[in-house]
Structures are given as structure tokens and as C-alpha cells.
Amino acid sequence: MVIPLGIRSIAVPLSLAVVMMGAIAHASWASYRPPANIGRPGNREGAATRIARPMLLRESTGGTESCLTEPKQTVVALVPKDNNGLSSTPTPTLYSFIPANRGAALTLTLRDSQGTEVYRQERPAPTEAGIVGWPVENVSLKKGVDYQWELTLTCTNGTTAIKTASWFRLMPLSPSQQQRIVQARDAAAAFAMAGYWYDALNQLAKQRLAQPEDTQVQQKWQALLQSPAVQLANLANQPLVPLPPQP
């Protein structure tokens, strides 16, 4: 079909305008700003270790493969590159990328700054690759305390365990911060600029689930993960997948 010249001359600028609008929305959305005076060592990207089981000699000699179907993938906690962040709520949702697998279990453990275990729960791992959100509930957390959260993926055949370790500090919003969040046009951006990583991420994750076709929400999610203080651009397009219930 031949498109009249007048229509062709309009179509090109319109398409460019759409691209430019997306780029502007991406560039103007707030980046995550890490809070000052917070920082503990961690390891957001999991490293695999083989579980010794003397009864199965082939496991100790490397004859048994891991349950991961993509060897280059690993568990990654969705946290800033310094492995720390603030949460305004005592019931944060902790997000991690789970690689595709043929059957594994996930264990989430919380320890206080003294190393005392305060929370532990196990769930089946989703078998498809994606990002899961784990809501921490039924535990009493203290204001101003740093908590280490460890996520361990263990293959059900008992051959491989992958562990990440990250931190969050429970820090309720001050009255002035609460007012700014309430009045903000974009709560996720306001949380990100204030250093509340876990709140900003959870806000956008809920928006992605509620509006999966919304390109602006996707652009904001990508902008957050690509922030200089985060650098998780490789996970920006991964889907959100449900966390299976406790067995």
C-alpha cells in the first residue's frame, strides 16, 4: 500500500516523539541515593558450594550436576551494590533473582547485628527464572538495628547450595519524611531519593504486578536498578514470579 507523502511526513516525527518521551521519562526519574552512615559487608551475588555427602561418591568427584539449568546464572539479592539499605516498615519485602532450576528449596534467614537468628523460613523455589518478593512477617524487629538477611538456594538433590548475604536497617520515617512521601507525586521516587531502598523497590514491584503493560512503570523499574549506586541493569528486564507457599 502506498502511503501519501503528507501522512509519511507526520508518521516519522510521531514515532520519534514516542521514543523521546520514553527517554525523557527514564532520564528524569529519580535515581536511588544511598543513605549516609550505613554500611556493612555482604555478598548480594550468590556463590555455589557443593554439599558433601560421602554416601554418594559421584557428588564429591563432580559427577552430579547442579540443579541449575543455566550454569551462568546465580541467586542475586536485589540490593544496592554496597549490600545495604533502609526500610521504613518492620515487615519489609525482600527481593531476589532466582535462576531457572530443576527443583530447589529457598531458605531466608534474618540475624541481628550480634549474629542472633531472629527469623527463618523455607519455601520451594520457583523453577522458572525470575524475581521473587519474600515478605518478612511475624517477627519483631527493632528500630535502628541492622539486620542481615541471607537467602540460600539448595538443590533438592542435595548437591549445591548458593547463598547471598545483605543488610537492611529498620528506620521509620520521621514526620517530615512521612509528609513528603504522602505529598509526592511518585512515592517510589521519593523513597529512592530519601535512601529507603526496600520501600522504593517494593512500591515499583507492586506497580509492575498491577500494571504489567505500563511502559512508564517498567522504565522507572529499569531506572532504579540501573542507578549508579545499584548497578543491576542485567536484571532490569527479568519477570516478577510468585514465591511458592510454604509446604
Image (cartoon, grey):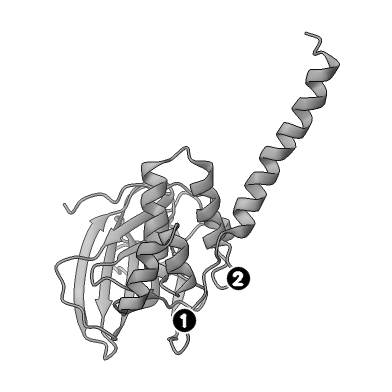
Task: Evaluate whether residue 143 shows in this view.
Answer: yes
Residue 137: x %, y % from top left: 18, 65
Under mark 1, the amino acid is Pro
Under mark 2, the amino acid is Pro
Give the label on residue 35, or none. 1
Q: Residue at 22% of width from left, 62% of height from top?
A: 122
Q: Which of the pair 227/23 is nearer the observer?
A: 23
Q: Nearer the viewer, mark 2 or mark 1?
A: 1
Cα distance, mark 2 to mark 1?
14 Å
Task: Evaluate whether residue 162 shows in this view.
Answer: no
Q: Residue at 20% of width from left, 73% of height from top?
A: 119
Residue 159: x %, y % from top left: 36, 62
Q: Say whether marks 2 and 1 touch (CB < 8 Å).
A: no
SS under mark 1: loop
Which residue is disc 2 drawn over? 228
The quadrant in which residue 57 appears is bottom left
The quadrant in which residue 98 appears is bottom left
Q: Above or below — where is 216 with respect to 227?
A: above
Q: Is residue 18 left or right of residue 150?
A: right
